[in-house]
Amino acid sequence: MEQRRNYTIDFIRLIMAMFIVALHSNPFAEYSALISYFFSQVLSRLGVPFFAAIAGYYFFRSDSNKKYQKTIQRHLQPYFLWSAIYLIYRFSQSEIGGISNSINDTLMTFVFTGFYHLWYMLAIIYTVAIVWMASRYQQGVCMLYYITFICLLIGILMFGYGNLFFRFPLAKHTFGSLDPNINMQTQWIFSVIPFFMMGYGLNRSNVKNSWIYRKCELLLVIILMAYFAEVMILQVFDFMRSTTLCLCTYPIIYLLIVVSLKHPDFVNAKIARYSAGIASFMYFGHILFVLIAQRIGIAQTPTYVIAVLLSTVIGGIIVKLDNPIMNKLI
C-alpha cells in the first residue's frame, strides 16, 4: 500500500517555514550583512515556491472529482481564522482609521491582497479556482500547465533580471506598472501558479524511471551551487531587482521534490507529523511574533529566534493535544 504522506516532504516543510521566518525578520543583520543576505534573501526565497509546488503535488495526486471544493474549503478555514487574528492586531495598533475606511480596507485586503503573508493562502485558493475552470475544457489543465512556463519566465525576468528587463520600454510600461510590494499582483501569477502546476507535471510524468530520478541528489547539489553563483553574478552586474525568482529556483524545487520521492522516509512518522503541524503554525503565526518583537525594539536575530521558538512550542502543543478546535490554527 502506498504511503499516504511523504515524511521527507513534511520535514522539509519545517525547514522552509524557518526560512520564511528569516525572510520577514532578517536575522544575523547585526553581525554580518553577507550571511544575513544569503539566509534571509537567498535561501528563504525557496520557501514559497516549495510550498506552492507541494500543494500542487498533493492536489494533482488526487483523482477525486471533489478535490477542487475540498481544497478551497480546507484553505479558506485557516485563511478566515488568521485573517481575523491579524485584523484584530491591526486594529490594536491603530493601523486602520475611520469606520467606513476600515470596512472598505478590510474587504479589499481580505479579497484581493490578504493580510501580511496570508496573500499566499489567497493565491492558492484562486489558483485552484483557475485550475477548476480549466478542467472543464478538454486538455484545459494541460494547456494551463504549459502556459505557466511563460508566466514563470516573465517572473524570472521581472525579479531576478529586473534591472535589465525593465530597460526595455515595452517591459517597463507593461509589467513595470505592477506593484512589486503587492504579492497578489506579481508573485501569484508569476510564481505561485507556475510552481503549483509543477505538481501537475510531476504527477503526469513517470519521473521514477528517469535519469533525473537516479541522479537527483548530485543534481540538487550542483543546481544549489549554480543558484548561489547566479545570485552573486546578478548582484555584481546589477541585473537583479529581487531574489524572489531566479533561473535556478524552478529546478531546485523540482529536484527537492524528486529527492523526497526517492527518499520518502528521511524521518519517521512521528517527527513528520510534528514537523508538518509546527511548519503550518509557524507559517501562520510567525508574523504576529515578529511584528510584536519589532514594535518593542528587539533586534533582528533575537526576533527570529523568538518567532521560531514560540512557533515551535505552540505548534508542537497543538499537534500533541490534537484538539479539533485548536487544530483549526494549523
Image (cartoon, grey):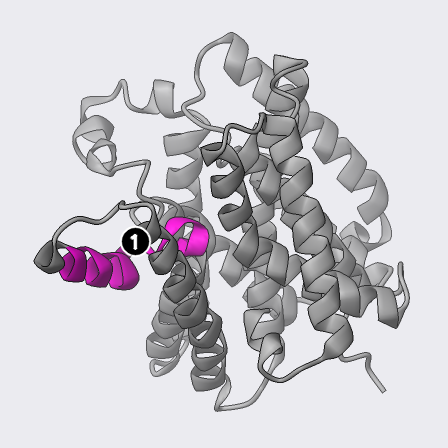
Q: Residue furthest left?
A: 100
In this rendering, would 152 be left or right of 165? Answer: right
In the displayed structure, 190 sits above or below 247; it is below
**Residue 310, percent across and down?**
67, 51
Region in magenta: 102-119
Badge 1: few (under 14), some or many (20 or more) residues near its Cα, within 10 Å? few
Q: Is residue 131 magenta?
A: no
Q: Residue, x 62% and y 84% (percent of image)? A: 324
Q: Residue, x 80% and y 52% (percent of image)? A: 211
**Front one among 84 and 273:** 84
Residue at image mark 1: 91
**Residue 281, percent across and down?**
61, 61
Q: Quadrant of residue 327?
A: bottom right
Describe the element under mark 1 as helix, strand or loop: helix
In the displayed structure, 9 sits above or below 220; it is below
**Front one among 21 and 8:** 21
Q: Residue furthest bottom?
A: 65
**Residue 117, percent across and down?**
44, 50
Q: Identity of the amino acid at label 1?
A: Phe
In this rendering, would 23 be left or right of 81? Answer: right
**Residue 144, percent across and down?**
40, 64
Residue 236 can be seen, yes or no: yes
